[in-house]
Amino acid sequence: MRNLIPVLVVTATLIALWYAAVVPMNAQWAQDQARRAGQDLGFAALISETMTQQRPRLPAPHQVMAELWNSTVVEEMTGRRGFMNTGSLSNRSLVYHGWVTLSATLLGFAIGSALGVALAVGIVHNRAMDASVMPWAIASQTIPILAIAPMIIVVLNAIGITGLIPKAIISTYLSFFPVVVGMVKGLRAPDHMQLDLMRTYSANGVQVFGKLRWPSSMPYLFASLKVAIAAALVGAIVAELPTGAVAGLGARLLSGSYYGQTVQIWSALFAAAILAASMVALIGLIQRATLKRMGMAA
């Protein structure tokens, strides 16, 4: 409860600021409409008009929440193409688009995490890799993903690889780096006294890794996985933009920008945020259970 109160206070403040910004952002259109109709728009009417526009510059929070509800629960429960009537997800619902993006995210996250852990193990145990791979890993993150994503898509399309794999590779590109950095730090966490103690027991390299370095790296691993899963989601969404995809949260954002549907854009953004928060929370639960089982504080 002590942790929940600050979150609720910040949320309420952000919503209040959001509502306050809606009026000046949407006022011009409402005043133009009233002027053309020869009407005098009072303050109360102005606020009402700015909160209910079909294509506002900045949609009000309740409009975004209504769109989220309609494009998920209502569409799947009562829609003609919804799950209840057809047995499959509607291509109009955010549940369907979220699943398309989530599948690429999870695949990219799995590949990126495995790659990050493997590179970190090599960097810690091999001086040549430490001197050569780590600088390249850092340099790779200086390239904007918006610049490299279209090139990856085009190259893979040229060799016949389309669909889920190109998006997963872009997610991998963003998600492997935090895992590398976190795991290198974690695997090097044991101090000299702990390493000397292992040597007095005549422990070989595999035993030092399995009984000391790997357990010590667990808090770092889970912290970096939380960053990596969010980065993987961003990569999957960005990958959908240059391909002209018809499914996925990126495609939803793109179609909303084409047709000026700002409410649709904001609802897709909130769906992505909810998806990211859910995945981070799931990793947090796994972290707590794992560290508790290992006798470590979560």
Image (cartoon, rainbow, N blue to C red):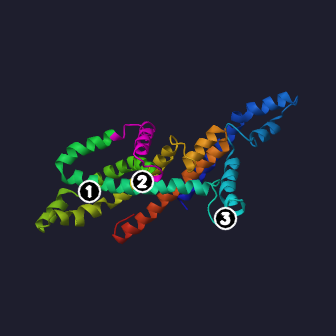
292 or 154, nearer to the observer: 154
Residue 276 visible within the image: no
Mark 2 and mark 3: Cα distance apart in space: 30 Å
Query: For the residue marked with disc 3, what is the amino acid?
Result: Thr
Please state if 180 lies on the left or on the right of 258 as rendered.
Answer: left
Pointer 3 or 1: first along the chain:
3
**The N terminus lies in which quarter of the figure?**
bottom right
Residues packed near mark 2 inside 10 Å, few (<14), some (14 to 19) or many (20 plus):
many
- Let me know if residue 86 is in the magenta part: no
Q: Give how far across and how far down residue 174 sits, in percent.
A: 40, 46
Q: Residue at x 69, y 34 (%)?
A: 25
**Residue under the image location 79 percent in, 29 percent down:** 32
The spot of residue 284 in percent (x, y) is 45, 61
Q: Which disc is residue 187 wearing?
A: 1
- Whole-angstrom CA distance, mark 1 to mark 2, is 23 Å
Q: Which residue is disc 3 drawn over? A: 86
Total residue callouts:
3
| 109 relative to 137, above or below | below
**Of pointers 1 and 2, the one earlier in the residue sequence:** 2
Range covered by the magenta-colored residues: 140-164
- Report the side of 134 relative to 48 (left or right): left
Q: CA distance from mark 3 to mark 1?
A: 51 Å
Per the image, the residue denoted by label 2 is 108
Q: Amino acid at mark 2?
A: Gly
User: Quick one: SS at disc 2?
Assistant: helix
Of tags 2 and 3, which is closer to the observer? Answer: 3
Residue at left 56%, top 58%? 4
Q: Position of residue 253 (x, y in %)?
A: 59, 44
Decide whether the magenta segment is chiefly helix, strand or loop: helix
Tell me the crowding category of disc 1: few under 14, some 14 to 19, or many 20 or more residues within 10 angstroms, Cα based: many
Quadrant (top left/top right/bottom left/bottom right) for the C terminus: bottom left
- Which mark sits nearer the N-terminus, 2 or 3? 3
